[in-house]
């Protein structure tokens, strides 16, 4: 439906127009008599139309299309300041609100964004009732230790469609501690976005916090000691017996993967701090973690359960203890790895050894503190055969290793092999900086180098641009200075495939360009590529322009939607000895998966079907190791007799 409007009162210009056109006809009718009857009337009509157009322009004529369609973004606060029960209740509230108020006749849309420290899209805008049934998927990998409402508002603005009115509904307790939502809300209001707030009201003071469990940091074997548990009843005292909160303490002790329950007493907490003491002694030398948890009899008396746990650590001194980490892919049927002989020799020297495979790695700094030395025994940073079982050392785990060494005095040893150092994908990691040797070859005279090309097409994945930047950076970090790297994406400005570095050849040497490449990757915004063939032709041409002694590999990430490449293009890759590994994520049915699977099989690469985007960095770390093979030199060594 269209409406005609004037910015200025229309009657003034209507009167002016009638007067001017009447005067035009009176003054010009006789002066144009020489044109003949038909031509004279036609000229007057055209002049009248010109005058009318000028008057309408001065009146600021506007033709507005009326659209009653509405898109509502629900922003749900999932931070830890809101009890879990109320977080679940707000989901039910939003589902019911959409069901009751969404108008099918106008095709209204609804969307859900969840936020804590960051924001994630739970449900993209849809013209249907919300499909949320059990739990929120967007909170799976989201930190809830902060409330960043501004991040949710920014994501809502980026998600709004263009063809409807816009409204935001914020469901939160208002305890923002990150970002500036107020100033952003003012900008949204000026932009015509309505904002409503549904406050989550918390019952003041009805909460218990476990402040700490205190144990000595070091004790001797068999020495009695005391574990003190401090709990705080935050309810304001009124003098009533109802001020006390009843519940149960669960005190446990963990050693490696073994955990035992030490005490589970029923307690009654008065308002304020309450201290409970437990006597213990330990006969086995090791590093122990004490955990305490409080569970209230009445959940309404303890609204925030996230602060109901605390941990403490103690070290019982004894013999030396070594943690040896091996690649899980080298584990045999008896559960032993390739370094079993070393393990037996160390144990024969009265050294306690714990073997840990890379698919069961430590998760906290406390897991490492029981050891005197950690040995990385020919273990790669990432290993696995498909997206479901691939494992890696995360940045957090590497930081734990280094902190355990620098601050706790633990030894750190890396044993070489075909899966260690640069060949194992450890190049440019924080671990390399901490070791006394370089993991890369800096000598430009080395004949064999690696080259990696990547095709980026995951724009339809939720947060796809973010994940493409993450995986490209991870792959680039794995490459050495003498290696080559290139990235192909769909350039929305030109409407065609393009090399991201802007270089005609596309694949450039990493040396001297790494920081520039990372900067370009951070600004990357790949579009929706319609077909694979042009990008693959660009890649194979780039590979062919490299020195002959170059180990070449290619990774394609896509939803499988582009049309498949020609067989002649695939044959070009086989002739150039380039393997293509494909990563399928968010594919549109079996057809998209088949295209990517066939491409990998035809060139001898690896096919990954990814369901969780968190597996993407691990895959790229592993695949980028293929171009690190030039770091391995195997040849016969003949001894030389010198005397």
Image: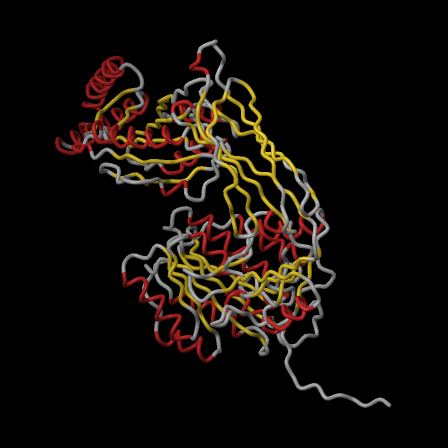
Figure coloring: secondary structure
Q: In this view, does 30 lie above or below 355?
A: above
The image quadrant that residue 38 belongs to is top left
Name the residue at the top extreme: 239
Q: Is residue 404 above or below residue 186?
A: below
Left or right placement of residue 264 versus residue 375 in this view: left
Residue at 19 percent of width and 32 percent of height: 106
Residue at 44 percent of width and 75 percent of height: 573
Q: Is residue 303 above or below residue 617?
A: above
Q: What is the x, y in percent for residue 626?
A: 53, 70
Name the residue at the left extreme: 37
* 542 or 167, nearer to the observer: 167
Q: Is residue 618 above or below residue 218?
A: below
* 152 or 358, nearer to the observer: 358
Q: What is the x, y in percent for residue 344?
A: 63, 70
Left or right placement of residue 16 versus residue 546 in this view: left
Q: What is the x, y in percent for residue 523?
A: 52, 48
Left or right placement of residue 572 versus residue 53 in this view: right
Q: What is the x, y in percent for residue 299?
A: 39, 27
């Amino acid at each position: 439906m269209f409406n005609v409007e004037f910015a200025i009162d229309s009657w003034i210009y209507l009167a002016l127009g009638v007067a001017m056109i009447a005067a035009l006809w009176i003054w010009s009718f006789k002066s144009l008599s020489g044109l003949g009857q038909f031509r004279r009337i036609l000229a007057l009509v055209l002049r009248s139309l010109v005058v009318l157009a000028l008057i309408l322009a001065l009146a600021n004529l506007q033709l507005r299309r009326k659209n009653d369609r509405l898109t509502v973004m629900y922003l749900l606060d999932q931070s830890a300041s809101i009890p879990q029960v109320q977080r679940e209740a707000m989901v039910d509230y939003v589902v019911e609100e959409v069901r009751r108020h969404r108008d099918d006749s106008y095709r209204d849309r609804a969307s859900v964004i969840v936020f804590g420290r960051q924001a994630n899209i739970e449900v993209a805008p849809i013209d249907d009732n919300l499909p949320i049934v059990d739990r929120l998927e967007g909170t799976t990998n989201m930190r809830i230790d902060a409330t960043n409402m501004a991040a949710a508002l920014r994501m809502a603005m980026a998600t709004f469609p263009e063809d409807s009115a816009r409204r935001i509904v914020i469901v939160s307790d208002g305890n923002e501690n990150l970002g500036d939502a107020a100033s952003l809300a003012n900008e949204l209001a000026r932009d015509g976005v309505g904002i409503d707030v549904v406050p989550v009201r918390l019952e003041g003071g009805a909460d218990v916090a476990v402040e700490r469990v205190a144990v000595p940091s070091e004790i001797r074997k068999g020495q009695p000691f005391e574990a003190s548990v401090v709990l705080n009843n935050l309810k304001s005292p009124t003098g009533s017996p109802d001020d006390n909160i009843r519940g149960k303490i669960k005190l446990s002790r963990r050693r490696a993967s073994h955990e035992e329950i030490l005490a589970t007493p029923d307690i009654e907490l008065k308002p304020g701090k309450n201290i409970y003491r437990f006597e213990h002694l330990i006969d086995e030398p090791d590093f122990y973690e004490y955990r305490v948890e409080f569970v209230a009899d009445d959940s309404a008396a303890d609204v925030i359960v996230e602060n109901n746990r605390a941990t403490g650590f103690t070290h019982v001194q004894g013999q030396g203890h070594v943690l040896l980490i091996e690649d899980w892919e080298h584990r045999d049927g008896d559960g032993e790895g390739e370094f079993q002989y070393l393990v037996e020799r160390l144990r024969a020297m009265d050294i306690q050894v714990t073997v840990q495979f890379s698919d069961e790695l430590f998760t906290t700094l406390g897991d490492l503190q029981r050891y005197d030395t950690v040995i990385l025994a020919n273990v790669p940073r990432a290993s696995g055969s498909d997206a479901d079982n691939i494992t890696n050392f995360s940045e957090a785990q590497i930081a734990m290793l280094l902190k355990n060494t620098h601050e706790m005095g633990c030894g750190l040893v890396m044993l070489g092999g075909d899966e260690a150092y640069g060949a194992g994908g450890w190049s440019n990691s924080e671990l390399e900086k901490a070791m006394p040797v370089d993991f890369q070859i800096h000598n430009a005279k080395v004949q064999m180098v690696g080259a990696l090309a990547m095709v980026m097409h995951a724009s339809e994945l939720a947060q796809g641009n973010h994940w493409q930047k993450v995986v490209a950076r991870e792959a680039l970090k794995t490459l050495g200075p003498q290696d080559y790297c290139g990235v192909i994406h769909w350039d929305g400005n030109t409407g065609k495939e393009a090399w991201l570095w802007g270089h005609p050849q596309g694949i450039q040497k990493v040396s001297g360009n790494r920081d520039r490449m990372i900067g370009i990757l951070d600004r990357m915004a790949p579009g929706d590529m319609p077909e694979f063939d042009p990008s693959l032709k660009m890649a194979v041409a780039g590979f062919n322009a490299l020195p002959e002694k170059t180990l070449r590999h290619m990774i394609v990430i896509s939803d499988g939607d582009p049309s498949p490449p020609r067989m002649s293009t695939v044959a070009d890759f086989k002739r150039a000895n380039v393997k293509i590994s494909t990563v399928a994520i968010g594919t549109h049915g079996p057809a998209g998966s088949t295209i990517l699977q066939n491409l990998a099989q035809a060139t001898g690469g690896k096919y990954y079907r990814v369901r969780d985007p968190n597996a993407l960095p691990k895959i790229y770390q592993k695949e980028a190791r293929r171009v690190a093979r030039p770091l391995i030199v195997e040849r016969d060594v003949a001894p030389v007799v010198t005397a």
